[in-house]
C-alpha cells in the first residue's frame, strides 16, 4: 500500500501566512495517518518561484530574481518544519531536476501536436498569475484580488485544452474532484466550453525556457503544476518514484486554484501521455472574522508567531477543528485561545494530570492491570473503525471530533466514578483499580489516535503513562496497556498568561 500527498507549491513573493499553514497541516495529518497504518507515504511540498510577481518583488528589493528566491525560500522551508510537518521532499521550481523535467514534459505535449502559436491579447492578473476573460472582470478589476488587471498582447504558444473536454468530463464522473459540490462547479465550467490557454510568456526573462523556442519561458502554471510529477524523478537521486507513487497521488488545494488542478493539469497530463492523479481535494478558506483585530495585534497572522505562543500542536488542532475541513468558514484568533484552554488544556491536559496523579497517589504509581470496561472499549473501537474511513474521505474535522468523543467520555467517567471518593473506603479497592485502569487505557488509545493531529503531545501522553511511543494504528484498541509505574505528569498545555489574541 502506498500514498502520495501534495500541497500546492507556494509563491515566494511574500512570507508565509496562516492560510498557507492550513494546507500544509492538513496534508501532514493525511500523511501521518497513512504512516500510522503502515502505508508507504510520500509527502511533497515546496515553492513556486518563476512567477511574474516574484520577479517583480525581486526588482523592488533590488536583487536578481535568483538571489531573491534563494533568500526567501529559506523562510518557506522553515514553515513545514515549524509546523512539525513530516515532509519527504521540499521542491523548488528553480531546482535543476525540476527545470529539466518541465522541458521534457512540455516537449511531449508539443510532439503530440497539442501546441500552436497565436497572439494572446487580453487581461492578465499578476496576483492570480492568470489570463482572464473580459466577462470575469468587475469594473476592470480582478474579481478575486480587486486590483486592476494588466493588458497583455504577445505572441505565445497555446495548449489545445478544448480537445480534452470529453476526457475531463469523464474524469469528473469517476470522482476525480472532491468534495462533490466543488466537482459540480468544475463540471459546469468545463461543460460550458473550454478555451485553449497560453503556456508561454514572451515578455519575461524569468522562467524555464521552452525547449522548442528558447526566446519564450514557460507560463508559471505550466511550470508549477508539473512539480507534482517532476519531484518523483529527482527527490531520491538515482531513483524514479513515478511508478510507485504517481498512481496514488492526492493533491490538496485551496478552492481558488481548482481550475488549474482539475482542468488544466489533467489535460496536460493526458496530452503528455501520463495518467492523471488519483484525486484532487479542494478545501475552503480559513477566513478570519477578526482580521482587523489581529492586524492591530501586529503579526498575529504570522504562523511563526502563533506557534511561538501556542505551540505547533495547538495551531494544528485549531486548523483541523476551527472550520469543518472542506467547507468555507470563518474562525477567529480568540477561538485558538479558547480551544487551547478548554479543549487541549482542560479536556485532554487535565485528564492526563488527574489520571497520573491519582495513580501515583492511590496506587503508588502502579497502573492497575485488568480488562477495560465495555463503554470505554466501545468508544476506542469506534475510533479504530471509523476514523480511517473519515480521513480517507478527507473529513479531518469529523475524525478529530470522533477522537474527542473518547476524551469527553473519559472525563465524564472521572466525574461519575469520583475516584477520590472510592479511595476513601478499602471495600471499593477493586472498583478503583478498574477506574484507574480504564482511564489509563483510554488515554493511551486516545494518544495513539491523535498522533496525526498532535504529533508532539501524543508521545508525551504515552511517556507519562509509561507506554511505548509507537503510534501504529493497531494500538488504537482496548486492552493494550503495558504494566508500568508512573509519576504525576507535567501539564501538557500550561496556561498562557497574556495570550494577546484572547
Ligand atoms: N503557487 C500557486 C500554487 C501552485 S501549485 C502547482 C499558489 N500559491 S499561493 O501561495 O498563492 O497559495 C497556495 C495555497 O494556499 C492555495 O491552496 C491557497 O488556497 C492557500 N491559501 C492561501 N490563503 C488561504 C486561506 N486564508 N485559507 C486557506 N487556504 C488559503 O496559488
Image (cartoon, rainbow, N blue to C red):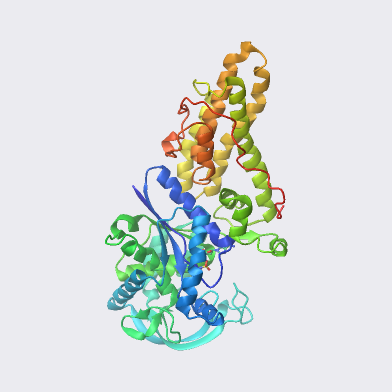
Residue 237: name its quadrant: bottom left
Q: How far across and how far down the image is residue 74, in percent?
A: 49, 66
User: Is the residue 462 above or below the residue 244 in the image?
Assistant: above
Q: Residue at x 53, y 66 (%)?
A: 256
Q: Image check: 166 left or right of 294?
A: left
In front here: 184 or 219?
219
Q: How far across and how far down the image is residue 114, in percent?
A: 33, 77
Count up the numbered dots: 0
**Can residue 17 be seen by looking at this rendering?**
yes
In front here: 414 or 360?
360
**Can residue 275 be seen by looking at this rendering?**
no
Q: Image check: 40 left or right of 387?
A: left
Q: How far across and how far down the image is residue 73, in percent?
A: 48, 68
Q: Residue at x 45, y 84 (%)?
A: 204
Residue 398: name its quadrant: top right
Q: How far across and how far down the image is residue 271, in percent?
A: 32, 71
Q: Image check: 244 left or right of 501?
A: left
Amino acid at each position: 500500500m502506498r500514498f502520495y500527498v501534495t500541497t500546492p507549491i507556494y509563491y515566494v513573493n511574500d512570507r508565509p501566512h496562516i492560510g498557507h499553514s492550513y494546507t500544509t497541516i492538513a496534508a501532514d495529518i493525511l500523511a501521518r495517518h497513512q504512516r500510522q497504518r503502515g502505508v508507504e507515504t510520500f509527502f511533497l511540498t515546496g515553492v513556486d518561484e518563476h512567477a511574474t510577481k516574484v520577479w517583480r518583488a525581486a526588482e523592488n528589493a533590488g536583487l536578481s530574481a535568483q538571489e531573491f528566491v534563494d533568500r526567501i525560500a529559506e523562510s518557506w522551508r522553515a514553515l513545514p518544519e515549524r509546523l512539525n510537518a513530516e515532509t519527504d521532499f521540499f521542491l523548488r521550481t528553480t531546482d535543476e531536476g525540476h527545470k529539466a523535467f518541465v522541458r521534457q514534459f512540455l516537449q511531449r505535449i508539443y510532439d503530440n501536436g497539442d501546441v500552436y502559436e497565436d497572439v494572446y491579447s487580453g487581461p492578465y492578473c499578476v496576483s492570480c498569475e492568470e489570463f482572464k476573460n473580459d466577462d470575469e472582470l468587475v469594473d476592470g478589476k480582478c474579481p478575486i484580488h480587486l486590483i486592476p488587471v494588466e493588458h497583455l498582447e504577445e505572441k505565445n504558444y497555446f495548449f489545445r485544452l478544448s480537445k480534452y473536454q470529453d476526457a475531463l468530463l469523464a474524469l469528473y464522473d469517476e470522482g476525480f474532484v472532491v468534495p462533490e459540490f466543488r466537482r459540480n462547479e468544475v463540471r459546469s465550467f468545463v461543460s460550458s466550453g473550454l478555451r485553449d490557454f497560453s503556456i508561454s510568456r514572451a515578455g519575461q526573462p524569468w522562467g524555464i525556457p521552452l525547449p522548442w523556442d528558447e526566446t519564450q519561458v514557460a507560463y508559471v502554471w505550466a511550470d508549477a503544476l508539473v512539480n507534482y510529477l517532476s519531484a518523483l524523478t529527482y527527490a531520491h537521486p538515482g531513483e524514479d518514484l513515478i511508478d510507485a507513487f504517481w498512481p496514488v497521488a492526492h493533491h490538496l488545494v485551496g478552492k481558488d486554484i481548482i481550475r488549474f488542478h482539475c482542468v488544466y493539469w489533467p489535460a496536460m497530463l493526458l496530452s503528455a501521455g501520463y495518467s492523471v492523479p488519483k484525486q484532487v481535494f479542494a478545501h475552503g478558506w480559513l477566513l478570519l472574522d477578526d482580521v482587523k483585530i489581529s492586524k492591530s495585534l501586529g503579526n498575529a497572522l504570522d504562523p511563526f508567531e502563533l506557534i511561538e505562543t501556542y505551540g505547533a500542536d495547538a495551531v494544528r488542532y485549531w486548523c483541523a477543528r476551527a472550520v469543518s475541513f472542506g467547507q468555507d468558514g470563518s474562525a477567529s484568533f480568540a477561538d485558538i485561545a479558547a480551544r487551547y484552554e478548554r479543549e487541549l488544556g482542560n479536556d485532554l491536559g487535565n485528564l492526563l494530570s488527574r489520571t497520573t496523579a491519582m495513580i501515583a497517589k492511590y496506587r503508588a504509581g502502579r497502573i492497575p492491570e485488568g480488562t477495560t470496561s465495555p463503554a470505554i472499549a466501545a468508544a476506542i473501537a469506534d475510533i479504530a473503525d471509523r476514523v480511517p474511513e473519515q480521513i480517507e474521505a478527507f473529513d479531518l474535522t469529523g475524525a478529530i471530533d470522533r477522537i474527542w468523543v473518547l476524551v469527553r467520555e473519559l472525563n465524564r467517567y472521572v466525574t461519575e466514578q469520583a475516584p477520590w471518593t472510592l479511595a476513601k473506603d478499602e471495600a471499593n479497592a477493586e472498583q478503583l483499580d478498574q477506574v484507574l485502569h480504564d482511564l489509563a487505557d483510554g488515554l493511551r488509545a486516545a494518544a495513539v489516535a491523535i498522533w496525526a493531529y498532535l504529533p508532539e503531545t501524543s508521545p508525551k501522553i504515552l511517556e507519562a503513562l509509561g507506554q511505548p511511543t509507537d503510534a501504529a494504528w493497531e494500538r488504537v484498541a482496548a486492552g493494550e496497556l503495558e504494566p508500568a509505574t508512573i509519576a504525576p505528569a507535567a501539564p501538557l498545555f500550561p496556561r498562557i498568561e497574556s495570550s494577546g489574541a484572547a
